[in-house]
Amino acid sequence: MKKITYEQLTFRNAPQLKGKLEKAVIGIAGCGGLGSNAAMALARIGIGKLILVDFDVVEPTNLNRQQYFINDIGRRKVDALEEKLKMINPFLQIEKHIEKLDGEKVKIIFKEAHIVVEAFDQVSEKAMLVKAFFGNLFKGKYLVLASGLAGYGTANTIKTKMLSKNIFVCGDNKTDFLVEGVMAPRVMIAAGHQANKVVEIVDKIIFSSQPAVKDRSEI
Amino acid sequence: MKIFFEYLGLLHIEGVKNKSYLDVDGNCSITDLFAKLQIRKEHQKFISVFINDEEKSRHTILKENDKVKLFLPTGGG
């Protein structure tokens, strides 16, 4: 495999992010449509560490929106995703967990994470993650949820909103997968919103005290 | 007393305009609010409650001018 440097990988990033993204630890709760796409976006821009959690294997029905290939069918999602992320960003640290998350496991697995990206299918799982963030253990951590990414049509209704001081939600908050199906275009837009919010939190909140780099020649 | 009320996600509450002021009785808890709004039991367990941008429990007593957000996520990922 050809070799690149971290500086080359991140050369086109916003200069003020230098020294920040590589220190960030991001949890990905579910490696399906939202999780695999958000992880890809974060790996490409040079995030430091991803904690990938998923209990499932790749199925043919995942290919319409998830970052997997036909050759991945039957493989654990966390394994297939790790392989692809490393092909983009060999500097990325990855911690994998083959688990079905519950309130207790969330607290242990995401202990190190600055931000958790919620990327579940089911309403009950999404609600579980919000509840887990309710309490002192997650004080200082951030949760970026998704709600409303199903179907097709206008994508301009997909927005990022603040729910609380440390919880944000991305989506149109209306469409549901059981009614309208889920497909790559809107799922990837919602995942893009999530990854974008992660970058903003990393820059403006988690590592906000670092001086910004104005001159690209320093990179 | 009045609270500012907003709901997001799968919730649809008949007769209550989203992002509007709502009259509630004094000493009204979140549980009381769910009953007043006739929110279905199967939805209640998945709803997150935010008051003035902080997540709160069902036992929280509302105060005048509280900004109350109820969030019931839609499925899909």
Image (spheres, rainbow, N blue to C red):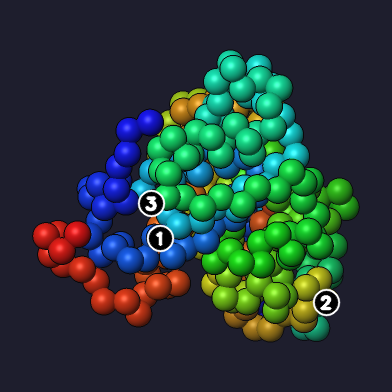
Closer to the eye: label 3 or 2: 3
Closer to the eye: label 1 or 2: 1
The answer to whether residue A34 is above or below residue B32 is above
Q: Which of the chains bears the disc numbered 1?
A: A
* Residue A155 on image: x %, y %: 43, 35
Discs 3 and 2 carry the same chain letter: no
The answer to whether residue A186 is above or below residue B33 is above
Rate crowding at label 1 as few (under 14), some (14 to 19) or many (20 or more) other CA atoms within 10 Å.
Answer: some
Discs 3 and 1 carry the same chain letter: yes
Q: Mark 1 and mark 3 in contact (Cβ < 8 Å)?
A: yes
Say which element carries label 1: helix
Q: How many marks?
A: 3
The residue labelled by disc 3 is A46
* Residue A127 on image: x %, y %: 73, 54
Identity, as a three-letter code, of the amino acid under mark 1: Glu
**Of A146 and A2, which appears nearest the observer?**
A2
Identity, as a three-letter code, of the amino acid under mark 2: His
